[in-house]
Amino acid sequence: MPCYRCGARQSDPARGTNLWVRGVRADEQVLICPDCQQNKGWSTDLDHCSVCGATTLVRRLGHTVCRSCEASATAEFLAVETTMDRGFAIRMPGPGRHRRTDSRDLSADVASAIDRVLGRAPARPTQSAIADALAASEPQKAPPEGAA
């Protein structure tokens, strides 16, 4: 990948520290060569972290992550819950931490799903068992008067 400012290509670096700097510009990862880093204000057109303001951003698996504070710009967008969720996300202290405000307990849902899969949950009633239970719960109709 060439330097995004001057187009210089990086040669195979020697062991040790790499003088090329990674950054993110317009949601694309870019490299900046050591010569361009000598220019004043070389980092002004790079994207900045919305949490700490640093330019030490990297792209990992399509997500932009700050190397200084580990905040993920994508995590802010992922706070929007799916249509299956009835709660809404609220911002907690610290980057990328969200919680739901509703009272649903995920651990109870997971435990019941595991019990069903492993056969520890009560079996679901069959249609005939449901029909028998409904018939037993219906009040018995008295025969009409005069019928024998």
Image (cartoon, helix red, strand yellow):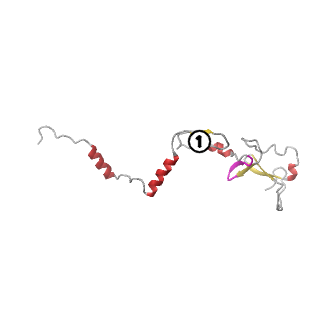
Residue 63 position within the rendered picture, expressed as x and y whole percent measured from the top left: 68, 49
Counting from the top left corner in percent of width and height, residue 24 is at: 75, 48
Q: Is 105 on the left-hand or right-hand side of 10?
A: left
> Start and end of the magenta stretch?
60-68
Q: Amino acid at mark 1?
A: Arg
Does the magenta segment cover residue 131?
A: no
Residue 26 vs residue 117, the one in the foreground: 117
Q: In the image, is 3 to the left or to the right of 94?
A: right
Which image quadrant for residue 51?
A: top right
Report the residue at 15% width, 38% height from top.
Answer: 144
Percent coordinates x, y for residue 102 in the rendering: 53, 39
Residue on which disc 1 sits:
99
The residue located at (69%, 44%) in the rendering is: 73
Q: Nearer the viewer, residue 40 or 101?
A: 101
Q: Secondary structure at mark 1?
A: strand
Q: Is residue 78 visible?
A: yes
Answer left or right for 14 relative to 137: right
Which x, y percent locates residue 8? 84, 55
Q: Is residue 65 magenta?
A: yes
